Amino acid sequence: MFQIVRLMLNDAGDIIARRPLLPLFELREHAMAVARNEASGLWGDFGYDEQRQCWWATDARGRKYRFDVEEIASAENAA
């Protein structure tokens, strides 16, 4: 299972807030597509970071975000 995590960054690029988003996705490709939509919906610039393999964005106020897709253990795999 995969989850999108929205990270708010400060001016130095350090993470200052972390918010997991729902729903969970069975395929990484689906989570990446939704992460792209989340990034594009912030009314600022957005793009793909090849090095980190995630989407980034700024909002209308200039705040910076990163949308990471993380693999998580499902309840079935944890049991």
Image: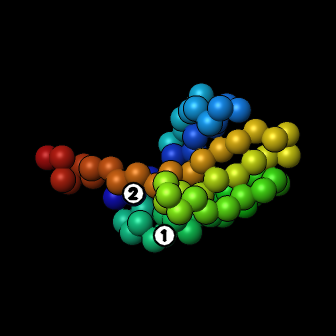
Above/below status of 49 relative to 22 = below
Please report the residue visible at 61 percent of the width from the left and 62 percent of the height from the top.
48
Per the rendering, the mark at residue 2 is 2
Above/below status of 48 relative to 21 = below
Instruction: Give neighbour class at mark 2: few <14, some 14-19, many 20+ (Cα, 10 Å).
Output: many
Quarter of the figure with residue 61 = top right
Please report the residue visible at 70 percent of the width from the left and 52 percent of the height from the top.
57
Residue receiving disc 1: 30
x%, y% of residue 51? 50, 58
Position of 14 compared to 78: left or right? right
Q: Is residue 74 visible?
A: yes
x%, y% of residue 52? 49, 54
Residue toward you, 17 or 73:
17
Please report the residue visible at 56 percent of the width from the left and 33 percent of the height from the top.
15
Q: Secondary structure at mark 1?
A: helix
Amino acid type at image mark 2: Phe
- Asked if the residue under mark 1 is in contact with the one under mark 2, i.e. CB atoms within 8 Å, the reply is yes
Mark 2 and mark 1: span between their CA atoms?
9 Å
x%, y% of residue 32? 52, 65
Q: Residue furthest top?
A: 16
Instruction: Give neighbour class at mark 1: few <14, some 14-19, many 20+ (Cα, 10 Å).
Output: few
Position of 58 compared to 13: left or right? right
Please report the residue visible at 85 percent of the width from the left and 46 percent of the height from the top.
60
Q: Is residue 21 visible?
A: no
Amino acid type at image mark 1: His
Q: Residue furthest right?
A: 60
Quarter of the figure with residue 36 = bottom right
Q: Which label's residue is closer to the chain start, 2 or 1?
A: 2
Residue toward you, 42 or 76:
42
Above/below status of 12 relative to 51 = above
x%, y% of residue 28? 41, 66
